[in-house]
Image: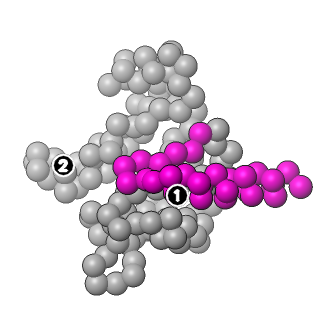
Amino acid sequence: MLRIQRNYVEAGSDVIITNTFGASRIMLDRHGQGDRTVAINREGAAIAREAGAQVVIASIAFDRMADEDDVRTMAGIGPGQAAEFMAANGCDIAALNCGTGVDVTMAAKIVQRYRGSCDLPQLLAAGPRIVGGCCGSTPAHIRLFRQRIDKYSHSSRV
């Protein structure tokens, strides 16, 4: 895996991922490795750092709960606990990606909860050069991103 990560760095990547997206306890339990969840994720981050990842971004998917106006990961972890874990385990930036039922308003609430639980920079404070959407994004999402990014960029220069 180190060689694969180095190939991306040598190709010019500024940021590489840890390749641990499927390394949740639920997914690893399917392969009899659930008890190694923390170790596997730590090793993925260590390999990415060794390969030359100057920044480790932890991006977590949350799903909206059916019975309350809140979100959790597939393993039942809330944003505050997730942010604390990211900060305690060497991540440089706390991020999130979409999940079932998570819209832009809910994503903003998740970021606020991150901020209440850790001092890691969030998306706009990190100064991204690229911001995008993933599955389920619409032109309206991208338009809102553009408006918020432009407003943030303008206010941070003043």
| Residue 157 at x, y percent in the picture | 85, 51
Residue on which disc 1 sits = 140
Q: CA distance from mark 1 to mark 2?
A: 36 Å
Eyeballing the image, is 68 above or below 15?
Answer: below
Q: How many marks?
A: 2
In the rendered view, does 21 fall on the left or right side of 95?
left
Residue on which disc 2 sits = 28
In the rendered view, does 147 fall on the left or right side of 17?
right
| Residue 125 at x, y percent in the picture | 68, 53
* Residue count near mark 2 (Cα–Cα under 10 Å), binned few <14, some 14–19, many ≥20: some
Q: Work out whether residue 8 or residue 34 is closer to the camera in this orientation and state it.
A: 8
- Name which residue lies at 74% across and 58% down: 151
In the rendered view, does 72 fall on the left or right side of 147?
left
| Residue 56 at x, y percent in the picture | 51, 41
Magenta region, residue range: 130-158
Eyeballing the image, is 118 above or below 132?
Answer: below
Q: Amino acid at mark 2?
A: Leu
Which disc, if any, is residue 85?
none
**Residue 40 appears in view:** yes
Question: In which quadrant of the rendered view does residue 143 lie?
Answer: bottom right
Question: Is 153 a magenta residue?
Answer: yes
